[in-house]
Structures are given as C-alpha cells and as structure tokens.
Image (cartoon, coloured by chain):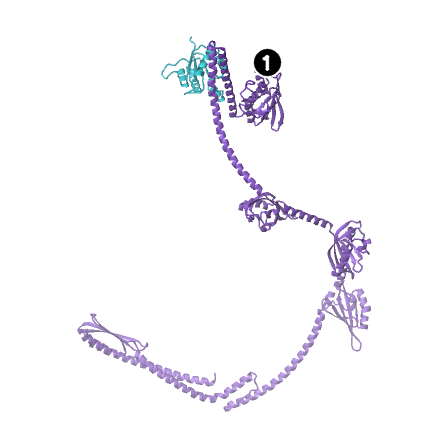
Chain colours: A cyan, B purple
Amino acid sequence: MEQPHILLVEDNPDDADLTVVALRNNRIANHIVIARDGAEALELLFGPRAGATPELPAVVILDLNLPKISGIEVLQRIRSTPRSALLPVVMLTTSVEDRDVLASYRNGCNAYVQKPVSFDDFLDAAGRLGLFWLLLNVRPPGQ
Amino acid sequence: MSIRTRIILATLAVVAAVTVGSVAYTIDRERRWAVARLLDAIGADIRLVQVVTAGPLYDGNIAQLNAILDSLFANPDILRITLAETRGDIALARNREPATELGEQIERRVRVSRGGDELGTVRVVYTTANIEQRLTQSRNTVVLFSLLLMAALSVVIYMLASRLTRPIERLTRAARAIAAGDLGRDIDTRGAAETAVLGQSFVQMRDAVREKIADLAENNRHLREEIEQRRQAERERDRLASIIEATSDLVSVADPNGKVLYFNRAGRSMLGIGTGNGQPATIPEVHPRWASDLVVAEGVPAAIRDGIWSGETAVLRRDGREIPVSQVILSHKDPEGKLLYLSTIMRDVTERKRAEAALRASEERFAKMFREAPENMTLVGAADGRYLDVNHEFERQTGYARAEAIGRTSLELGLWANPSLREDMFRSLHASGSVHEWEFTLNRRDGTRRDALIDATMVNLGGEPCWLFIMRDITERKLAENALRQSEQRFRALVELSSDWYWTTDEHHRFTFREGEVLRRMGLAPEADYGKTRWEMDFVSPQAEGWDAHRAALERREEFRDLLAARRGGDGELYWATISGRPLFDAKGGFLGYHGTGRDVTAQVRAEQALRRLNAELEEAVKARTAELAAANKELEAFVYSVSHDLRAPLRGIDGFSQVLVAEHGARLDPEARRLLERVRAAAQRMGRLIADLLELSRLTRTEMRTQEVDLSELARGVADELAGEARGRDLRWHIESGMKVRGDRAMLRIALVNLLGNALKYTRDAAPALIALERVERRGQVEEFVVRDNGAGFDMAYAARLFQPFQRLHAQHEFEGTGIGLATVQRVIAKHGGEIRGEGRPGAGAAFYFTLPV
C-alpha cells in the first residue's frame, strides 16, 4: 500500500519550506503536497467541480491566516463533508491568541501547534506532529 | 232769609215764569208761519225755474242761463244753485255762506225737459237761517223788556215790605242777644201796634232774668271760697301723714295708759304686721322683754318728766326676731300740763351694728394678713419711727425676732447698711406721705447683705397714724438683671462683630427685628423689611413658588437650617445668605413667631459656582480625552497584534534558514562564518521572545478580569516548582507564606507571579544559597500588602522610577538577559486589581517588590 501524502496549507513560502525541512529532518518521508491558499487546499481535498474525487491525505497541516479562504473556513468544510469528517487536521500558526485557539478547537481541529520563532523548537514541534499522526495514530477504519 | 227777600223773590219768580212762557209761545208760532211762507216761495221758484231754463238750456244760451241764476240767487234764502246739462256741456253754480249757524237746509231738485227729452237738472238749496235770525232778534228785545220790568217791580215791592218787616227784625235781633247772655242791650219797641206790645213784654221779661242771675253768681262765689279752705286743710294733713307714712323710722302714738293708738307704715313693716288686727295693743308688746323693761321703767317716766327720752332698745317682730333700734320717746301735754298722749320714734340700727361687726372682722383680717403675708411688712410709729409690729416674713428676712424688733427703730437694729439713706427716705416720706421702690442694702442679723426695695404709706390704725412698710428682697432679681445686661452686651458684640445676623418674626412671619453689622455692609437697612414676610421681599432666589416648601415647613412650626437665598444689596451686587431659624412659643405653647440667624455666604457661593463651572469644563475635557485615548488604544492594540504576528514570520525564516544553512552547508563554512550565523539566530530568537512578551502585555490590557478568590500561596508554589525545574543544580531556598488569600483573576495573577518570582530567580543567579520569599506585610482595610524579596543583584534606587516602564532595563543584556517587559506586565496586573506596586533595592543587596491586592 502506497504511503498516504500530507497536505500542507501555507501561504508563506519560507514557512512552507521550513515546515517541509522540519518534517524531513524528522524522517517523515510521506509525499508533501503544498497548497498556497484555502481555495487551492479545498480543490486538492475535494477535487475540481467535474473531476473524480482525489485521495484524502493522511493529515492536513493548516495555517490560519490564508488568502482567499481562511483556515477556519477550510476546517469547517472538511468537518462538514462526510468523507473528510474524521480527517486529522493540525492547526499550525503563529497566533497564540485565545480566540484563534478556541475557534480552531470549536470547529474540530485535532491539534493546535504554535509556530515557534526558534527553528530548533520548530523542528521539535514538527517532529512530534509527524510521529504522532503518521506513526502512532491509528487512522479511522475504512480509509 | 228775611220775609222781605222772600216776598220779592216770589213776585219776581211769578213775573219771570209768565214772561218766559209767553215769549216761547209767540216765537214758536212766528217760526211756523215764516217757514210755511218760505215753502210756498220755494214751490213758486221751482216751477218758475223749470219753465224759464228749458229754453235757454235747449239753445245752449249760457248768458241767459247765468242771468236766470243771478236773478234767482238774489233771494237771500237760497244758499246754493247748481245747473247741470244732461249732456254735461253746461254746468253752472252759485254759492253763499248762511247768515247764521241756526236753522235747517231744504233741498229741491228739478229736471228740466222739453218734449219728453230731459235737458238737465237744477238743484236749489234753501236755508231757514234768515228766519231764525229774525226770530232771535225779536226774542232778545222781549227778554230785555221783561228784565227792565222785573227790576222796577223789585224796587216797588222792597219799599212796601220795609215798613212792615223792620220792627220784627229788630225784636228778633234783641231776642238773639238775650239768648247769648247780653241782657244790657236797649230794645227798640217802635213799630206797628201789635209789634210794640210784643216788644214791651219782651223788655220786662229781660229785666226779671237779669236780677235772678246776679243772685246766683253771689251764691257761687261763697261756695267756691268755702271749698278752697277745706281743701287746703286736707292737703296739709295729708302731707304730714304722708311724711310720717313715708319715713323709714317707726312712728307710733299711745295714750297715757300705754294703749297704742297708731303705727306708721314703716312701723308695721318693722313689726311684720299688716293694718288692722294683730297690731300690738300696749307698749310692752312692741318690745322684747329686756327692752320693754327699759322703756317702761326708765323711758316713759323720763319722757313724762323731761318731755323727751332716747336710748338703745329693740323691737320684737311678729316672727320673734329682734331688731335693734335707737328710740326716742316724746310726751305731749295740754297747756295745763296734763298728759295727752305719748309718741315714739324708733330707727332700725341693724345695718349700723352689722357695719361695726364687719369693721371689727376686717381689722382682724388685716392683722392676720399682715402677720402671714409673704411680703416683709412692718408698722412703724409715725412719731418716733419705732416698730409697732413686724410680720413673719420680716423675721425670716432680717433674722430678728418680733420681740426684738418691736419698740426699736430699724437704725437701732442696724438694718441699714447706709444709715443716711434712711434719713433721706423719711424725709421723702414726710414730704409726700409715701415712698415707692426705695432701694437700699439690708444688713441681716447674721451680717449678710441683701438688696431690697421699700414701699411705705401712711395708715391709720385705731386712730393712730403710722407707716406701713413693705420691703422686697431683690437680690436675685438684680443678679438676673446683671446677667441679662451682660447677655445683651454679648449679643450686641456678637451682632456687631460676627458675619451673621439675628432676626425675629411674628406669628405671621413678618419681620419684627433684624440686626447685624454684616447687613449694613451689604448696604441693607435692617429695619427696612420690618412688617414684611420673606416672600414679600425682593429676593432674587428663591422667587414666588420657590418659597412654598419653606412656608409649609413654617406652618408645621419646624426648625429650618441653611435655607439659601439671594438678594441684591444696596450696591446692586448679588449677595447670598443661608438662613436658619426655629419657632418660639410662649409658656402655654402658643406660637409667637420664629427667630434665628442669617449668614453671608456670598464668597462661598461664588467660589462654589466657579468650582462647578471649572469641574464641568474639566469633565468635558476628560470625556473628550478619554474618547481620544480609547480610540488610540484600539488602534494601538490592533497594530500590536498584527505587528507581533507579522514580525514573527520573517524571524522564523531568518532562524530557520540559518539553521538549514549550517546543517546542509556547514562543511563549506569556516568556524567564524558558523559563529556569525549562530549570532544571527540568537538575535532572531531574542526578538521572537520580545514580541511574545509584548503580545502578552497587550493581551493583558485587553482581557476582561474574572474575579474569584485565589490562594496566592498555592499559586506561587506551583510557579516556583515550574521555575525551579529550569534552574536545576542551583542552591534555591524558597519561602512562601501559606494561607495568603486574595480576590483576583487567577490567570493574570499567575503571570504576575511568574514574572516576579522569575526575576528573583534570574537575579539571584550568583547567590548561594539563593533566598526567594513571598510574604504578607500588612492588612490595610480591604487590601493587603505582600512582598517578594530576594538576596540577588538588587538595583540602584536612583533608577527605581524606570522599573515599571516597558523596555527599561537596569542591567545590561550580557549580565542578565530579559526583555524589559516583565515588571511592566506585573505592574499592569496589579493595577488592574486596583493595587499598587513599588520596588526597593540596593546594588548587591537584593531587591524587594511590595504590592497590594484586594482580599
């Protein structure tokens, strides 16, 4: 069975590259698909209008502040679609504001990780994320 | 009416009746004859007209017709002629007025025709007026003649009758005079024979009557004189009797045997008896036993002997009561000295006796009153000035007993502190007969002195003139007067010196008094408003109904305080005053009015007004500034939020890519390049922390507090444990007092403790052991002060002011790392809880941060 991919939704190319580096440094070899905004993320998850439904990623790493469609909205779409209702979603964002954290959990994110400024810390966080969701976490049955 | 007149009138009446009858008859016959003739003439006239007018009418000859009418109209009996042709071409007429209104009109109408044709009509009107005129003239002539005849006849009859009737008339007049009482008149007896006889008999009869009347008049005069004498005597007797009857004394008469003959009215009433039966028969029955003995044994014999006796006896009334009398007994004798009768006069002296008894009682009362009177009273002999008597009050006031005083003078007793004053008083007393309120100082027996007033007046006591002295102790009154005078002086001083004034109003709240210098300074005359109520005065405030509440309070008789009122002074300035007052009542609780004070508070009110104005302005300014600040804060927060997020992303890039560079291309870099890259990373990370701290500070500002009870001790221990974990290997000694409870937001307080304790940990890095303590200091009402103390690096108090400002650090970065936000955050937390924080320290001697929190 082919290893499922990871969907990283991040508009800042620096952060995207660093996240990829951090994941790779933690020996996470899954293919990483990057979406630059919310709209692109939704297209990657649920396909274009007329096309066939694409395969779901193992996990979605989702930034909050996104162009076009915000991270919260993407999360809401994922949770409101039956096929992806149980898809693991990790919020990865700079904000430590209570209202952002609350909004994320209220809409059903599985984890909320703050992007640290220090790359070492970031590596730690990314590593824990990858291990947790890709190695230890049992995926919902039938997927 | 005399006989003569009657004869004349009768004769004239007959002549007049005959004349009138014959004249009426003649005139009537004359009229009938004249009218018949006139009718005949009319018949002839009409026939003639019918004939003579037919021709000319037929021909239309008007001239001829006119001639016919004129000739016809020559007859004076015709009034009107009209000729009218049937065809209407010719119409002629003649008219005249009748000679007199008398008579009647006779009208005739004839148709003029020829050969059966009717040519016209002639109308002729006649009058009998001419006949009547003639008849009237002849009647007048006859009447005139008759009157002349009658006049002549009257004269003839008068002459004849005079001779016959005159003697009779004379007798008649004489008889009338005699009837009227005139008997002295001469009677003329001339005349015809029968008449003369009649006259002489009449004269004889008159003389007889005259004699009889003179006799009667003489008799009457005698009778009248006799009657008058008798009446005189009766009146005299009645007068004497009425005097005796009217007198209030008993008058009685008895015969020599003692049998009582008469009692007057007063006597009967004194004895209580009526007239007639029941009257005492003898003298002894009139008196009670003792008095009758006296009268019989002494009074009557003395009266018989001397003619008169008088003494005090008594009368015995029918009802048994005794009436004291003073009695006089008289004896009446004839010229030979034989006793005819005895009379007595007794006067009731009950009233006199009663008055004497009353006088005795009054004197006794006076004596008692004198003795018991609450006033100090003394009687002093007018001649020698020695006490005749003194009363109890005298004894009490002076301390001298009555026995000591009587017979001595006040001078001898030494009552006068100033004896010369006593001389003056007696001088005045002798001069005017009395003295009034003579003031002197009394020396009491025990040597104490009292102020007293003396009143004295002359009285007659048992015929002896003496002075009655009344002395009043006025010591208390004088003390009260002095006190009052002082009080008035104090009041005067108060009024003149204080900035208040005093006022009184009557029961209708009208000013009766007002005094205070301050009023004059305002330019107001205190008396100007007497008689007015406040609401009738020209107050600028309150006005009209503004006084209603105050007036209602006055009607309830309530006390009022600090009523604020404004009024223009004499200088036109507005003055403010506060007025306070309370009601006054008399002893019976009747309302008398109000009294109270007023105070000039103009300066105060002006200051308050200015202050209020300033406050209002200030409040406006604050409001505006607050709004500005709020807007600025909001902008700032939004800025901080976005800045801290946006700044972190590039930092992450710097740090991340530096790391990647080292990791992936480290082999190609020399050690110096790697060291520089590390410094780049360190700088980026430090900036990251700075931003995080800033973010926290800003979040604190924005977060709502959730207040609850927080166990500060427990919270601090948790934080200490956490911090200790990061400082392993150091010798740390924590002292956290237990049971410190405060009210506050747990999350915020935790942030404050993390910073405070974290700082302490950081600055004690070089101390071994490191001592960090959190303790209570003291409780101040609703807040408690705590302190975090350490034995670390400390700080210079010179810079203490900068401790709590963000980004201000007292240590170099290389000494102690930090962002400079920590204490600013702590200060903000404490401030949000309403507390205060201050730091104390000395370089190298540790630091202490005192803060207060609500408990």
Between B240 and B528, the residue placed more toward the observer is B528
At 43% from the left and 87% from the top, the residue drawn is: B155
| Relative to B403, B851 lies left or right | left
**Position of residue B576 measured from the top left corner of the image (x, y, whole percent):** 57, 44
Q: From this viewpoint, which residue is outermost toward the bottom?
A: B193
**Position of residue B142 measured from the top left corner of the image (x, y, whole percent):** 36, 84
| Relative to B531, B662 lies left or right | left
Secondary element at tag 1: loop
Question: From the image, which quarter does the C terminus of chain B lie in?
Answer: top right
Pointer 1: residues within 10 angstroms few (<14), some, or many (20+)?
Answer: few
| Relative to B382, B715 lies left or right | left
Between B740 and B559, the residue placed more toward the observer is B740
Between B567 and B737, the residue placed more toward the observer is B567
Q: Is residue B615 visible?
A: yes
Q: Quadrant of residue A17?
A: top left
Report how many numbered discs are placed on residues in the image.
1
Q: Is residue B82 visible?
A: no
| Relative to B475, B799 lies left or right | left
**Position of residue B630 measured from the top left corner of the image (x, y, whole percent):** 49, 29
Q: Is residue B527 above or below residue A17?
A: below
Residue type highlighted by circle 1: Gly
The answer for which chain carries disc 1 is: B
**Position of residue B603 measured from the top left corner of the image (x, y, whole percent):** 57, 42
Q: Is residue B271 above or below residue B80?
A: above
**Residue marked by disc 1:** B729
Q: From this viewpoint, which residue is outermost toward the top?
A: A1
